Image (spheres, rainbow, N blue to C red):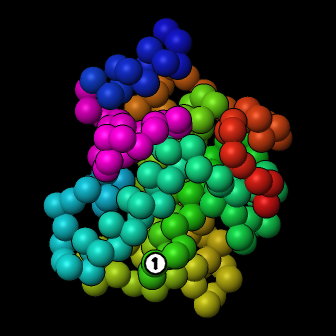
Amino acid sequence: MSIRDELQAAVHRGDLIPLPVTLPSDPQLRTMLLSRDVWELVIGPYQSVAHQARAGALRADLESFVRGENIVVCLTPYKARHSDFGLLDPVSDGAWDYRSRKARPSIRLLGHFADIDTFVALTWWPRTGTLDWSNKLPLADADARTHSMRWRVAIHECCERWFEILPNSTPVTGQKVENYVSGKFLLG
């Protein structure tokens, strides 16, 4: 079974949900597939007005990816400070974080590229601070050991989710940005 077939089967089962653009006239040049957990973060049901507001900003960020707008991609772990997508350590896992930073609190979606221009967002975490509408702990903490441990757990969970949903496929890996995105991108 090809990766495309396995993605279609996951969408058919409801394990992955394609993010549509809000305006039908907008182009859909890339694909963003969301796990149920990420879908509920973005689309609802919302736990509070603050959740709805933050979800709206996140959706706008994600739709810019789907529309094929410029994105900043960093292939060097720990150096993606100003990037939209950062490749995580270990690079061999092919796990990425998508960074939604314009609105607060900052949110990280963790996932993998299934193919060029096809990102599968599997888990999400607040970057810093607690949320009044979620019990998820933030990835960042003043204690460096806790910070590092939370990131390792989050990356492990992301990789596990990939193989639960797409057990016969491996994500895109490597150090060539062209394997992940085409069109408008900048290296961060």
Q: Is residue 36 left or right of residue 126?
A: left
For image coordinates 57% across by 79% down, the residue present is: 140
How many circles with numbers are drawn on the protein?
A: 1
Is there any visible trace of residue 161 in the rendered image?
no
Judging depth in this view, the residue of 93 and 40 nearest the camera is 40
Q: Secondary structure at mark 1?
A: loop
Judging depth in this view, the residue of 56 and 141 nearest the camera is 56
Residue 33 drawn in magenta: yes
**Which residue is outermost to the front?**
25
The picture places residue 80, in percent across and down from the top left corner, at 74, 65
The picture places residue 162, in percent across and down from the top left corner, at 49, 37
**Which residue is outermost to the top?**
1
The picture places residue 9, in percent across and down from the top left corner, at 35, 20
Give the residues drawn in magenta, as a range: 13-37
Q: Is residue 77 above or below residue 126?
A: above
Residue 81 drawn in magenta: no
Is there any visible trace of residue 51 in the rendered image?
yes
The picture places residue 99, in percent across and down from the top left corner, at 57, 64
For the residue carrying disc 1, how many other residues have a C-alpha within 10 Å: few (<14), some (14-19), or many (20+)?
A: some
Q: Is residue 3 above or below residue 162?
A: above
What residue is pinned by disc 1? 103
Q: Amino acid at mark 1?
A: Ala
Residue 172, picture quadrant: top right
For image coordinates 79% across by 60% down, the residue present is: 188
Q: Is residue 154 above or below residue 52?
A: above
Q: Is residue 82 above or below residue 121?
A: below
Q: Is residue 175 left or right of residue 23?
A: right
For image coordinates 35% across by 26% down, the residue present is: 10
For image coordinates 31% across by 41% down, the residue present is: 24
Q: Is residue 100 left or right of residue 131?
A: right
